[in-house]
Image (cartoon, rainbow, N blue to C red):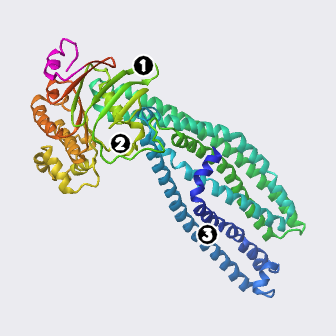
């Protein structure tokens, strides 16, 4: 997974390099920061000469007042540089990191739209898009760069401490193996805990989305408490996993703190002896002590960064699993473009099953000429809607061939193929935006005049103009501010606006009352003119404009006839609900 994470970081190589350089500017600033302490203690309060590396700039004969101002200048200069470096670092980190997260989310969303509907029902897609996408930033910027900066800071501080007193440097370093041992002991425990936490959070989000999206169904069956228990159960699992991670992390920090304190105590004990022996000045001891305290910070950061990398890789692993998923409906590399189909549809010995061993359609064959209407009837669960699903290539048949204009659907470009259809479902799905934007969903490039023309054709213009803001009225989540008939008219307006050669009507009036159905059917009759139409119906009234009727029972074609009136009147005898 580490290799895959670095592959994802490759497009951001130069921004990451720039960010690393900005971060590394903090290293020399950190090294210079304690120098004023040494000057004040040794050369202002004491009588030690200036260190040789400073006499190059100010000379060897310097008064105590000048030394004082030099110390103050260095102190203020390093403080200002520290804040400036931090300002630039925060700005550029967020600029690069946010772009990285946005790109990953866009890739995930694009991929998720290519995957099957069944995949989204089981894999917590929303959680992965929201919470796992930032893990690339967490890995590449928030963990790896601090890790590299901390390692280089440790190396630079060790060199300076060796310059002052190699024995103290050695004592300070003796704790490093213990800290790294602690890191490698706790790393797999914490990574496993984060993996369990994210899986539970994803499951909880899925329950919340399903329940709120189907709130009417949940309330109708009185299942609010059951759904609440499911949600709480998943969140309890995630909280327990998170608590275990936090306890492990806190225990790790406790052990690191104990080791750090032991190292500092040893440095002070030995350092005081060196000062008393004249081996080390008091100012140099304070500088070494500062470096030791700062050294354990980067050492802790190294350990923490390694733990953060494990957490990040868990998220990267989860979103990479989505990106690696193969679509159920792949597009051929040599797929044919399709500008506008003539509309001839053929099913040739088509069988299909959503799950292996449970066939939904079996050996279905029929041909629908261009500009004709096929009515499909049959009991609930007979496979009627599956016909439209396969025609749209949301799934591919398990066996057989579906052709459009005598060419296999698999041979067309997927986007071009789906652009040939206008679909009106039983339940109209509207988005939480304006009426105009909901109609324009069928053809985003449509002008406002075209939108109004489509609404007028669908007999929706009058009710739309009566709304508070007309076409700019917000319809609410899932269009809940509109009635069922109004939502269906907007759906028909979409179909008029798209003006596709093939029309799929999936029980478009089954949820409407008789009066509303009659007015909608008039609009549908106008919409069907010159188009190949697949009419899936439960009501006899919706079948009267069909040229031919196909009867499905248990996934098989039991009858296909052009005697529309005869088939309608005989349906009750065949025990098929219409």
Q: Measured along the vertical axis of the image, is residue 378 above or below residue 340?
A: above
The foreground one among 248 and 140 is 140
Q: Quadrant of residue 190?
A: top right
* Labelled disc at residue 140: none
Marked residue nearer the N-terminal end (1 or 2): 1
Q: Measured along the vertical axis of the image, is residue 68 above or below residue 316?
A: below
Binning the other alpha carbons within 10 Å of mark 1 as few (below 14), some (14 to 19) or many (20 upward) gives few
Q: State the image coordinates of residue 73 (x, y, percent, origin top left).
A: 66, 80
Q: Measured along the vertical axis of the image, is residue 60 above or below residue 493?
A: below
Q: Which residue sits at x=43%, y=41%?
A: 114
Per the image, is 294 magenta? no
Q: State the image coordinates of residue 138 (x, y, percent, origin top left).
A: 57, 51
Q: CA distance from mark 3 to mark 2?
A: 59 Å
Q: Which residue sits at x=85%, y=66%?
A: 275
Q: Quadrant of the N terminus?
A: top right
Q: Quadrant of residue 360?
A: top left
Q: Which residue is mark 2?
A: 417
Q: State the image coordinates of residue 509 (x, y, percent, origin top left).
A: 18, 31
Whether label 1 touches label 2, CB < 8 Å: no
Q: Which residue sits at x=83%, y=68%?
A: 163
Q: Which residue is mark 3?
A: 82
Q: Which residue sits at x=69%, y=57%?
A: 298
Q: What segment is highlighted magenta in the picture?
A: 560-578
Marked residue nearer the N-terminal end (3 or 2): 3
Q: Quadrant of the C terminus?
A: top left
The answer to whether one can see residue 307 in this image is no
């Amino acid at each position: 997974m580490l290799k895959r994470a670095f592959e994802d970081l490759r497009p951001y190589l130069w921004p990451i390099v720039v960010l690393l350089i900005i971060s590394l500017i903090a290293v020399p600033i950190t090294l210079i920061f304690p120098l004023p302490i040494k000057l004040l203690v040794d050369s202002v309060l004491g009588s030690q000469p200036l260190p040789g590396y400073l006499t190059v700039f100010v000379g060897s004969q310097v008064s105590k007042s000048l030394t004082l101002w030099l110390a103050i200048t260095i102190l203020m200069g390093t403080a200002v540089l520290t804040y400036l470096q931090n300002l630039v670092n925060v700005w550029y980190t967020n600029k690069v990191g946010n772009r990285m997260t946005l790109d990953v989310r866009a890739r995930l969303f694009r991929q998720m739209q290519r995957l099957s509907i069944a995949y989204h029902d089981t894999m917590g897609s929303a959680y992965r898009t929201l919470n796992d996408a930032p893990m690339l930033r967490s890995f590449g910027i928030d963990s790896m760069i601090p890790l590299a900066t901390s390692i280089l800071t440790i190396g630079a501080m060790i060199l300076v401490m060796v310059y002052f007193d190699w024995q103290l440097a050695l004592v300070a370093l003796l704790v490093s193996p213990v800290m790294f041992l602690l890191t490698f002991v706790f790393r797999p425990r914490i990574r496993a805990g984060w993996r369990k936490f994210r899986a539970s959070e994803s499951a909880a989000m899925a329950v919340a989305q399903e329940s709120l999206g189907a709130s009417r169904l949940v309330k109708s069956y009185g299942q609010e408490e059951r759904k609440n228990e499911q949600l709480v159960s998943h969140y309890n699992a995630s909280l327990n996993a998170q608590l275990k991670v936090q306890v492990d992390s806190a225990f790790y920090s406790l052990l690191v703190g104990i080791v750090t304190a032991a190292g500092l105590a040893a440095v002070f004990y030995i350092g005081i002896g060196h000062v008393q022996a004249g081996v080390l000045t008091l100012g140099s001891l304070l500088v070494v002590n500062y470096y030791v305290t700062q050294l354990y910070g980067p050492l802790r950061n190294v350990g923490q960064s390694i733990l953060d990398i494990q957490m990040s890789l868990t998220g990267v692993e989860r979103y990479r699993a989505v990106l690696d998923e193969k679509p159920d409906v792949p597009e051929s590399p040599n797929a044919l473009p399709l500008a506008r189909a003539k509309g001839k549809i053929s099913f040739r010995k088509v069988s299909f099953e959503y799950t292996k061993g449970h066939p939904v359609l079996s050996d279905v064959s029929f041909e629908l000429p261009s500009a004709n209407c096929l009515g499909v009837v049959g009991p609930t669960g007979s496979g009627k809607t599956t016909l439209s699903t396969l025609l749209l290539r949301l799934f591919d048949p398990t066996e057989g061939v579906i052709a459009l204009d005598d060419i296999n659907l698999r041979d067309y470009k997927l986007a071009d193929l789906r652009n040939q259809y206008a679909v009106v479902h039983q339940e109209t799905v509207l988005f939480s935006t304006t009426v105009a934007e909901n109609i324009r969903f069928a053809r985003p490039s449509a002008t406002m005049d075209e939108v109004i023309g489509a609404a007028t054709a669908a007999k929706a213009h009058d009710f739309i103009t009566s709304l508070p803001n007309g076409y700019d009225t917000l319809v609410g989540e899932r269009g809940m501010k509109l009635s069922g008939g109004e939502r269906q008219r907007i759906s028909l307006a979409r179909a008029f606006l798209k003006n596709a050669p093939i029309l799929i009507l999936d029980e478009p009036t089954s949820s409407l009352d008789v009066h509303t159905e009659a007015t909608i059917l008039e609009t549908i009759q106008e919409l069907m003119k010159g188009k190949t139409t697949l009419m899936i119906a439960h009501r006899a009234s919706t079948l009267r404009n069909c040229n031919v009727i196909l009867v499905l029972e248990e996934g098989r074609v039991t009858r296909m006839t052009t005697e529309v009136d005869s088939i309608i009147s005989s349906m009750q005898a065949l025990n098929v609900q219409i």
